[in-house]
C-alpha cells in the first residue's frame, strides 16, 4: 500500500515511478550520459600481446550503444580485447545473473566478472555467449561463470563483484560486438 502511494505521488510530481522489489532489475548501463567516462578499453598489449581494437559509442535510432571492434591475436602470448566498467556498488545478494542486449558478427564473446577476491590482473570469472547479427537478450546465470584459476573460489558471490568486462578472447579472429544494455537479473 505504501509503495503504491509513493508511486502515485511520484507520478503526480512528475518524478520517475518507483518499482516494487519484484520488478526491480539492477541496471548497470544503458550507455547514456557520457558512457566514455565509465568504460575503459584495453588489449593484451598491457602484457606484451599484439591484439588491436577500439571502443566507440554509436547512436542508432536515437539510442546510444557501445561498439567494440578489433583483431584478436594470440601471437606473443596474447589473445584479447576488452571493455570494462568498475561497479560503483556491488549488486544485491539475490541477483541471479548478468543480462545483456547485444549483437555482433556471429562470434563467441565473454563476460569477465572481477570480485574483491580477484587480486591479480589475470584473475576473473568467465562465461561465454554468442553475439548474432540481430539485437538479442542474453542471460548468463552467476553459476555459469567459471574461475580463471585454482586460487579463486568456485563461484563468484554477487556482493563481492567489483567490475564487469565484455571480452573478445582466446583465439585469432575479427571482433565486432555491440552492446545496448547491461544489467543484473
Image (spheres, rainbow, N blue to C red):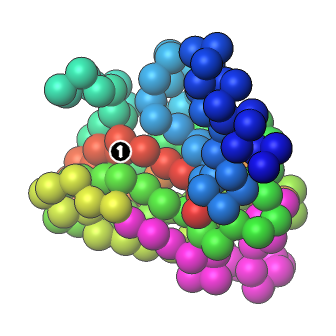
- Viewer-nearest residue: 90 or 152: 90
Expressed as whole percent of the image width and height from the top left, the position of residue 112 reads 57, 61
Magenta region includes residue 38: no
Magenta region includes residue 143: yes
Q: Is residue 8 left or right of residue 162?
A: left
| Mark 1 element type | strand
> Which residue appears at 59% of the width and 43% of the height?
28
- Viewer-nearest residue: 49 or 42: 42
Q: Quickly name the residue at label 1.
A: 179
> Quick check: 62 above or below 154?
above
> Which residue appears at 66% of the width and 24% of the height?
10
Residue span colored magenta: 138-159
> Which residue appears at 48% of the width and 60% of the height?
99
Q: Quadrant of the C terminus?
A: bottom right
Q: Is residue 90 visible?
A: yes
- Viewer-nearest residue: 52 or 83: 83
> Quick check: 77 above or below 70?
below
Residue lying furthest left:
133
Q: Image quarter for residue 178?
A: top left
Q: Is residue 51 left or right of residue 40?
A: left
Amino acid at each position: 500500500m505504501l509503495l503504491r502511494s509513493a508511486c502515485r505521488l511520484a507520478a503526480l510530481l512528475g518524478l520517475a515511478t518507483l518499482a516494487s522489489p519484484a520488478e526491480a532489475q539492477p541496471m548497470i548501463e544503458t550507455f547514456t550520459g557520457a558512457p566514455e567516462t565509465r568504460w575503459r578499453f584495453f588489449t593484451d598489449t598491457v602484457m606484451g600481446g599484439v591484439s588491436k581494437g577500439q571502443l566507440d559509442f554509436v547512436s542508432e535510432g536515437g539510442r546510444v550503444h557501445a561498439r567494440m571492434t578489433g583483431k584478436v591475436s594470440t601471437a606473443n602470448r596474447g589473445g584479447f580485447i576488452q571493455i570494462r566498467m568498475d561497479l560503483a556498488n556491488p549488486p544485491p545478494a539475490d541477483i541471479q545473473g548478468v543480462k545483456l542486449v547485444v549483437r555482433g558478427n556471429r562470434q563467441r564473446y565473454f563476460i569477465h566478472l572481477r570480485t574483491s577476491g580477484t587480486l591479480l590482473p589475470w584473475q576473473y570469472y568467465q562465461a561465454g555467449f554468442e553475439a548474432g547479427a540481430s539485437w538479442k537478450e542474453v542471460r548468463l546465470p552467476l553459476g555459469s561463470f567459471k574461475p580463471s584459476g585454482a586460487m579463486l573460489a568456485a563461484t563468484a558471490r554477487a556482493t563481492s563483484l567489483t567490475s564487469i568486462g565484455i571480452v573478445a578472447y582466446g583465439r585469432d579472429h575479427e571482433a565486432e560486438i555491440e552492446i545496448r544494455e547491461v544489467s543484473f537479473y
